[in-house]
Image (cartoon, grey):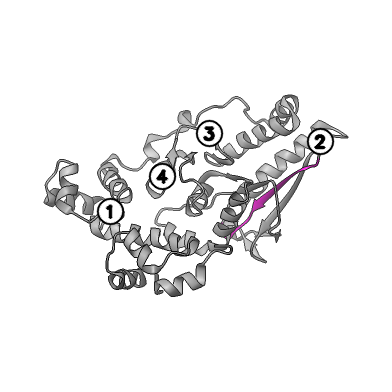
Amino acid sequence: MSALRIGVLAYPGCFASEVFGVPDLLTMATHIAGPGHVGYEVSIVSPRRRVAASGGTALAVSPLRDVDVLVVPGFELAPGLDVDAKLASLAPEVAAIRSHASAGNVVVSICVGAFLLAQAGVLHGRRATTAWLFADELARRCPAADVQPERLVVTDTGVTTTAAFSAMYDFALELIREHSGARVARSTARMALVDDARSSQTPYVDAHLLPRPGNEFSRRVMRRLDQNLAARYDLGALAADFNVSTRTLLRRFADETGQSPLDYLHASRVRRARHLLETTGRTVASISAAVGYQDAGTFAALFTRHTGRRPSDYRAAFRRAGN
């Protein structure tokens, strides 16, 4: 039996504590297990030569390599952050996640690292979790995932997601339990003063930090639009679905988001088109139709306005290796 190979994917702006938390707990477990125990081979990997974590902390990284488990830490999801732009800037990391998962290897996200897994298409059709504060946003961005905000750790067919920050220790203890045994996991938890009996993040929810209830209407409208990207936009039908007039729908949505439902739909369609351009060989016309535009010229103009690149140029720049 060989050592379990763990790779932690470091990237610009990731939380340094989430890069080192799991390796540190695994190191403790190895000492507790004692001589002769087949432990863990841990490396900090990146597709980049240099990485600065959140706060500007420089991280020493190794090139990407084959590992049994790839751990994806979270990043600072500060108010006002353009998450689309952030994820677009991490295209090499998203490609690495997709490649690793496609090879049948285990992928693990810590906290909002789940957003990178969603961007890679890894969460489609799977159960998942993330920090309770951002669970609604993950569900909106990845409607094909079954997001379970009360869970601390969710594993579904080779993909594990965790709640915020300290939930990385819940995951690490599960890994230690599976690889090194219950005794080592229990002793590691006690030595590190880590609770090894938690089962839910619900007790930690602070309602004062949750998005204002007044935003619930727009979130429901967004989810409906995301789930029907290719459908023709019909403002009257959309309003009827929510039992309001078109005027009320537009007013409430604008009050909560600062934009119209159609503007949101265009942005969401472009986000989906970017994913298809990066990960498939489908023609631009086919992708245009798949996201709701029968006129490829209209789609191209809209895509260029949102991304600064024509669809063909975007694909040339961001096409994932192996696709």
Which mark is in front, 1 or 3? 3
Residue situated furthest right in the rendering: 35
What's under tag 3, amino acid-wise? Leu
Q: How far apart are marks 3 and 4 (CA)?
A: 20 Å
Which mark is in front, 4 or 2? 4
Question: Of label 2 and label 1, which has the lower sequence position?
Answer: 2
What's under tag 2, amino acid-wise? His
- Image coords of residue 164 (percent x, y): 53, 41
- Image coords of residue 5 (percent x, y): 73, 46
What's under tag 4, amino acid-wise? Ala
3 and 2 marks in contact (CB < 8 Å): no
1 and 3 marks in contact (CB < 8 Å): no
- Image coords of residue 317 (percent x, y): 51, 72
User: In the picture shown, does residue 27 fall above or below 61?
Assistant: above
Residue under numbered circle 2: 31
Q: Distance between the residues labelled 3 and 2?
A: 26 Å
3 and 4 marks in contact (CB < 8 Å): no
Question: Of label 1 and label 4, which has the lower sequence position?
Answer: 4
The residue at 38%/45% (across/down) is 143
